[in-house]
Image (cartoon, rainbow, N blue to C red):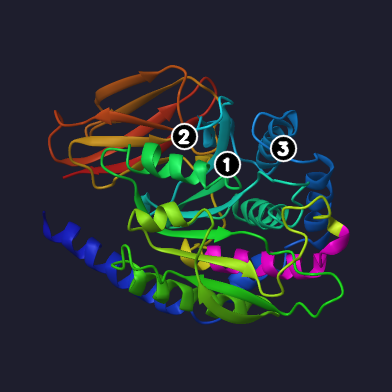
Amino acid sequence: MNFNTKTLFFLLFILSIANQSFGQNFVQAYADVVNQCSQTNITNNLTEFEAFGMKRRGTVQLQNTLNWLKSNYLSYGYTINQIQEDPYTYAGASDVVKNLVVTKIGTLYPNIYVIVCGHYDSIGGTGTNDNGSGVACILETARLLANIPTEYSIKFINFSGEEDGLFGSQHYVSSVVNGTNPKMNIRLVFNLDEVGGVAGMTNNTITCERDMSANPSTNNAASSTMTTQLMNCVTLYSPLNTFLDRAYSSDYMPFQSNDEIITGFFETNETTHKHTNSDFLINMDTVYNYNVAKATIGATLHFSQANTLSSPKNESDFNVSFFPNPSKDSLNINMGSLTEREYTFSIINIEGKEVLKFPVSNAKLIESVSISSLPKGIYLGVLQTSNKRVTKKILID
């Protein structure tokens, strides 16, 4: 590694520390994003969620809700390449059910993920509070962060199978998190479950959940640290008070068992309507749900280290990125917001000679190309579709 690269890494390290410290102070740019949270969107999404009925495995209602979620993410500007259906089955049922995963690639740590999640299935009724309320917060957060660069990657995940025993999140951990080689690197799992409040009560406090499990206990201290940061974000970006409690019986628990760092939100005034046919919007507090969404947005901006203070994004790069950079043996190509399924990726050396050409058909969001044959140096990476061209500098070390 040469002196310039060492210096660059040192500066990035110092900047990262500064950003993390600064993020726990009030950041006006974060507040500006949070203040775009829409009460109308929260109420409308709860109303539409409720109208789908009870969302159990094998029902058309569950599939219709999945389709509705996908259409919302697409309307926010996420591309079909960023949206993945994760199908699975579980014991005692033959029906194929699906998690929905939306991936936003980070600019500095593209292989490290902040997971913002909650379940969309219900039992006994429409589940408008349990967990349409969490779904509404996740959707509004995804909407507002769609075009904001974040240093860490984000996965917005809507799990199914939670009410039958956390089957969706357990499948995701065992088949995707642990099935990735190397194992998926998760910075934090931030779960939202039942955050709609109780109609007629003073709903001014959100419960923030930390890991206190004994098996394993190795992630408890880190969870406590992250939950303290979560509580700070609530105070900074919403009018809510906080109450600290333990994490239990929701979709972060399979991650907890996998030794991941978890935190979460849960309503402090707990509804008596969960898992019944009276879990309706009329029995919730939509203003409280809106305030929880504001806290969720502020916390996600903090945990993902959003770069809202930079100059406006150059739309011509379509959020395309090539990483890691510097690279050594392989380079990942992130299509960003490009929607075309075919492109050509080329690498050009400092003499202007094309030294690699990599055509891609039926492109996924992330493609990988070997660069092990190329000597160390500075290159230009070029992604070319039929009518768009993105170029970025690449360092091979």
Q: Are marks 2 and 1 in contact (CB under 8 Å)?
A: no
Q: Which residue is mark 2?
A: 335
The spot of residue 311 in percent (x, y) is 53, 61
Tell me the number on the disc at residue 65. Answer: 3
Report, in whole angstroms, how far the alpha carbon at label 3 lies from the one at label 2.
27 Å
Q: Quadrant of residue 308?
A: bottom right
Q: Is residue 291 above or below residue 25?
A: above
The spot of residue 347 in percent (x, y) is 29, 30
Q: Three-letter amino acid code at disc 1?
A: Gly
| Residue 286 falls within the magenta-colored stretch | yes
Q: Which residue is mark 1?
A: 161
The spot of residue 365 in percent (x, y) is 46, 33
Give the mark nearest the N terminus, 2 or 1.
1
| Residue 378 falls within the magenta-colored stretch | no
Depth order, front residue of 240/31: 240
Magenta residues, start to end: 282-301
Circle 3 — which element? helix
Give the mark nearest the N terminus, 3 or 2.
3
79 on left or right of 360:
right
Q: Residue at the location (60% across, 71% down)?
A: 29
66 on left or right of 225:
right
The spot of residue 179 in percent (x, y) is 33, 37
